[in-house]
Image: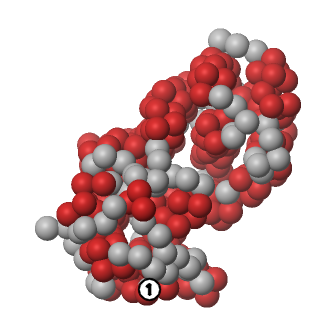
Amino acid sequence: MDGPRHTGQDTEGAALQELLLPGVSRTFALTIPQLPPALRTPITNAYLLCRAADTIEDEVSLTAEQKQHFHARFVAVVEGREAPDAFATDLAPLLSAATLDAEHELIRQTPRVVAVTHGLGERQRAAIERCVRIMCAGMPPFQRRTRLGGLADVGELNQYCYYVAGVVGEMLTDLFCAYSPAIDARRPVLAPLATSFGQGLQMTNIVKDLWADRQRGICWYPRDVFRRTGVDLETLAPGRDSEGLAAGLEELIGMAHGHLRDALTYTLAIPPAETGIRRFCLWALGLAVLTLRKVYRSADFLAGRSVKVSRRMVRATVVTTSLLVRNDGVLTRLFDWAASPLPRCS
């Protein structure tokens, strides 16, 4: 097992990470504590580093050149080629009020977060460094050229989803395999599904966040899909082109549904004894399916209103999947029931 080196500083760093995480992700603050203790620190660390990369890209006060500069420096910091203190000192004052207070704090605490990274096992650190390097190189070109007219086609959507989520699925697989020889033995099954798991979750977010994204002047929907349904994404507005929008959404939901089926196969390839890792995966998968159901069934969504899974359904998902976490047959039937209203890609 390739776990972290347990030093006093690592313990302090892990405690700091636990304080930072809820401020930048309520979902991961819910799911990461389900993981085995040896995985909580590296996976929390990985998420915080990815969020720091997002913070650089999302900062409205930075020019494209400044973002490129800080992304390159951030990769160097994570890989141990640059001192993190100078990076944090230079970036933190440039962040605007548009960036969350929790993200301001995350950037200020970069030296302590990266110290945790550098205290991890070799395989863990290599997996995290690879993810940050690919994300910082691949995500920005998409972020900087996106507009209300959306992405060119499904191929571009797949590329974007890989850089922001698929590579995270690969990293998680590497971390799971480094943690457990039994999981590592199942890598031939897990590895081909890892990016699909990430893409299913990302596509679910893209589908549900249509109107929130458009308020920020961006759109991640593929133009080729909506051109076929008679929708001009550039001029799309709530209550307009509802039939065409619904038809295009049906196709996107079908794609996401297919990826979430891959995610179930991925999860069930994790040995049943690893209940914490299974819960970590199942909770994310279950909430994604419920979100797609709500979007697909909700006329309100087409009018631009928020689509959220209720707290009651979140609790039901958590309780049900936790009780059934070892039972592959029942979990499969439960997924089939939950996803039955959703379209499938032809």
Q: Position of residue 173 (x, y in %)?
A: 43, 44
Quarter in which the C terminus is drawn:
bottom left
At x 48%, y 27%, the residue is 137
Closer to us: 283 or 167:
167
**Which residue is the extreme one toward the front?**
235
Horizontal side, residue 92 vs residue 271: left or right: right
Q: How is the image coloured?
A: secondary structure
Q: Is residue 194 above or below residue 130?
A: below
Closer to us: 120 or 192:
192
**Which residue is the extreme one toward the top?**
81
User: Which type of secondary structure does the marked residue at label 1 adopt?
Assistant: loop
Q: Position of residue 322 (x, y in %)?
A: 53, 76
Q: Is residue 322 above or below residue 47?
A: below
Which residue carries the number 1 mark?
A: 298
The answer to whether residue 168 is visible is: no
Horizontal side, residue 134 vs residue 116: left or right: left
Closer to us: 299 or 106:
299
Closer to us: 249 or 242:
242
Total marks drawn?
1
Q: Position of residue 293 (x, y in %)?
A: 40, 80
Horizontal side, residue 124 vs residue 56: left or right: left
At x 68%, y 63%, the residue is 26
Neighbours of disc 1 within 10 Å: few (<14), some (14-19), many (20+): some
At x 53%, y 67%, the residue is 211
Task: Tell me the amino acid under the disc marked 1.
Answer: Ser
At x 80%, y 41%, the residue is 96
The answer to whether residue 142 is visible is: yes
